[in-house]
Image: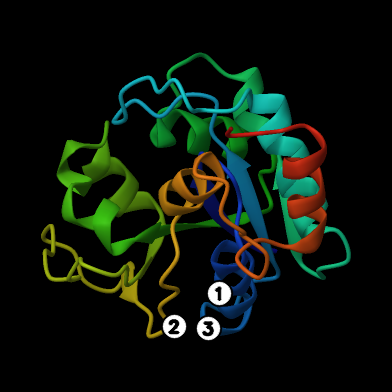
Amino acid sequence: MRIGLFGGSFNPIHNGHVALGKAMLEAAGLDEVWYMVSPQNPLKAASSDLAPEDVRLQLVQAALDGEPGLKASDYEFHLPRPSYTWSTLQHLQKDYPDAEFVLIIGGDNWECFDRWAHYEDILRNYEVVVYPRQGSEVKKVYGVGEKVKVLDVPLFPVSSTEIRKMIHKGENIAGLVPDAVLRRVEKYSLYR
C-alpha cells in the first residue's frame, strides 16, 4: 500500500485540507492519505491558540468521516516530542513494514526543508510530494531528483490562521470548514 503522510497542526482542519487529500490520492497514486495530527511541531513556536491535540484530532476525524481513503491519525501522540518527521517515518516503517510511505508537504515547508531533522535521510529513503501554497514558490531542490515530485494540484486560498482570526472576530466560517467541524467549533466555543 502507498500511504501519503499529510502532517500538520490542523488547527482547525479546513475544506482546503480535505480537498488536498482527495487530490493527492489520485495525483500521487496513493491508496490512502493519513492526516498526521502533530502534537508539537519543532519548527513552530508554542502558540496560545493551539487547541489541545485531542480536540484537533476529533475535528480531523469529523472532517474525514465518510471520505474514502482519508484517515485521521494520532500516531505522533505516542512518540517522543517534539514530533520530528524522520523519527515518525522510522517508527511507521517498523510498525508497517509492507507499506510504502510518501511524505506530502506544502511549498512553504519545502522552502525550509533543509532545516528539518535528517532531511537528507528523508530524501534518500522516501518519496516526497510537494504541493504549492499561496505565497510560496516551489523552487529549491536539495540535490535530489526522482524522489521529489511537485504536483500541480489546485491552490486553496484559505489557512487555519485566517480561520482562527475570523472566529475570534465573530465572523462566519461556514463554507471554509466541513459542516461537522463548524458544528463542533460552535458547540465548544473553540478559538474564541
Tag 2 or tag 1, which sits nearer the N-term? 1
Residue 157 to residue 124: above or below: below
Viewer-side residue, 164 vs 124: 164
Colour scheme shown: rainbow
Question: Which residue position holds label 3?
Answer: 27
CB of mark 1 within 8 Å of CB of mark 2?
Answer: yes
The part of the image, by quadrant, that contains residue 86 is top left
Front disc: 3 or 2: 2
Q: Left of 95 or right of it: where is 117? A: left
Q: Residues within 10 Å of mark 3 (few under 14, many from 20)?
A: few
CB of mark 3 within 8 Å of CB of mark 1?
Answer: yes
Viewer-side residue, 30 vs 181: 181
Viewer-side residue, 72 vs 63: 63
Q: Which residue type carries mark 1?
A: Met
Q: Residues within 10 Å of mark 2 (few under 14, many from 20)?
A: some
Question: Which residue position holds label 2?
Answer: 153
What is the x, y in percent for residue 70?
Answer: 73, 62
Q: Secondary structure at mark 2?
A: loop
Residue 29 to residue 41: above or below: below
Q: Secondary structure at mark 3?
A: helix
Q: Which residue type carries mark 2?
A: Val
Q: Label 1 to label 2, Cα distance in Å? A: 8 Å
> For the point 29% across and 70% down, which residue is it?
134
Residue 8 to residue 95: above or below: below
Question: Which residue position holds label 1?
Answer: 24
Question: Which quadrant holds the N terminus?
Answer: bottom right
Q: Label 3 to label 1, Cα distance in Å? A: 5 Å
The part of the image, by quadrant, that contains residue 68 is bottom right
CB of mark 3 within 8 Å of CB of mark 2?
Answer: yes
